[in-house]
Image: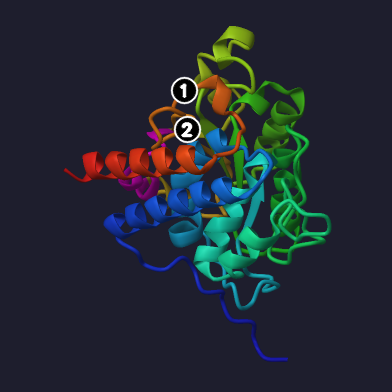
């Protein structure tokens, strides 16, 4: 058997190009929300859209045409309710057609469920949805890679709300204890839970200090600043290092759509024709403001 070649990593996009892709991702997300009859977890999808874009179009070393390559990076979506945003990011990266998502999302036996299922959708590394479980699974993947002397990285995207669960901190301790420098966690720190703002129910602050106390490298960035996301990815320690890294991304739930931003009513919802038009206009206005 010939030597396995490295997968094709994220395209060498510029920051400007990544920002355009993030806008396209949000646009496609809103369009899907406007055609699907049920509720979409739109608020947390919008807060994580820039992170998904940076990972799938820049950071992750993956090849959509060779999804079983053992040298590929692994990605675990711990906040599984943001699955549709991940699906669209993957479709834009070339894993499968966007039209398939729109035509079948949320239907019985669809590969594109409200939470990701690796059995239904090849390319998904891990079935998730029960919050607090993604990081423990990612730790297992990173530990397995260590045992096999494989050089790939394992990335995990968490919501800040789920980091109130003990399973996350058990995993954080296990990652440092096993010197898993091949593991990086991205936290979508939008400071909202499903029905309340985070600090009203769970006191997370001083949040970076908690991760540091568990022995992790801690990076805090604006999760909507693509340059900061790219810099964080570029400066990740080598995968043979001994300390896992957490990138805490300060974000806004509902980002890009003014009437959804920091609005508890938009944890999940659907868009009628008038709301969709209003949302698209708001998104376009937000994009123009950012590019001025």
In the depicted structure, whether residue 92 falls above or below residue 255: below
Whether residue 230 appears in magenta in the rendering, the answer is yes
Image position, residue 75 (x, y; %): 63, 54
In the depicted structure, whether residue 222 falls above or below residue 69: above
Q: Nearer the viewer, residue 149 or 169?
A: 169
In the depicted structure, whether residue 121 falls above or below residue 236: below
Tell me, yes or no, if residue 79 can be seen here. no
- The figure's colour scheme reads rainbow
- Provide the residue span drawn in magenta: 220-231
The residue singled out by tag 2 in the image is 254
Residue under the image location 75 percent in, 58 percent down = 147
Tell me, yes or no, if residue 131 can be seen here. yes
Give the quadrant of the C terminus: top left
Residue under the image location 70 percent in, 72 percent down = 68
Image position, residue 196 (x, y; %): 60, 15
Q: Nearer the viewer, residue 247 or 265?
A: 265
Residue 123 shown left or right of residue 206 in the figure: right
Image position, residue 289 (x, y; %): 22, 39
**Labels 1 & 2 near each other (Cβ < 8 A):** yes
The residue singled out by tag 1 in the image is 262
């Amino acid at each position: 058997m010939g030597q396995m070649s490295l997968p094709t990593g994220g395209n060498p996009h510029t920051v400007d190009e990544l920002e355009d892709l993030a806008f396209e991702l949000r646009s496609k997300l809103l369009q899907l929300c406007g055609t699907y009859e049920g509720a979409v977890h739109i608020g947390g999808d919008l807060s994580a859209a820039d992170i998904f874009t940076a990972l799938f179009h820049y950071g992750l070393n993956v090849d959509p045409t060779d999804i079983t390559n053992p040298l590929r990076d692994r990605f675990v979506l711990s906040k599984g309710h943001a699955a549709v945003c991940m699906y669209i990011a993957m479709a834009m990266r070339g894993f499968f057609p966007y039209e398939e998502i729109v035509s079948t999302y949320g239907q019985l036996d669809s590969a594109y469920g409200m939470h990701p299922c690796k059995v239904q959708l090849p390319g998904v590394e891990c079935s998730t949805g029960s919050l607090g479980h993604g990081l423990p699974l990612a730790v297992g993947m990173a530990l397995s890679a260590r045992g096999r002397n494989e050089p790939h990285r394992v990335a995990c995207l968490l919501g800040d709300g789920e980091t109130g669960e003990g399973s996350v901190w058990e995993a954080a301790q296990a990652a440092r204890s096993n010197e898993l420098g091949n593991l990086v966690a991205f936290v979508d720190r939008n400071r909202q839970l499903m029905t309340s703002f985070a600090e009203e129910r769970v006191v997370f602050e001083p949040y970076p200090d908690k991760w540091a106390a568990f022995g992790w490298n801690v990076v805090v960035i604006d999760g909507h600043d693509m340059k900061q996301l790219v810099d964080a990815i570029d400066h990740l320690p080598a995968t043979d290092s001994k300390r896992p890294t957490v990138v805490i991304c300060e974000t806004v739930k509902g980002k890009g759509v003014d009437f959804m931003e920091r609005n508890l009513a938009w944890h999940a919802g659907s868009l009628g024709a008038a709301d969709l038009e209003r949302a698209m206009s708001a998104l376009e206005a937000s994009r123009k403001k950012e590019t001025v």
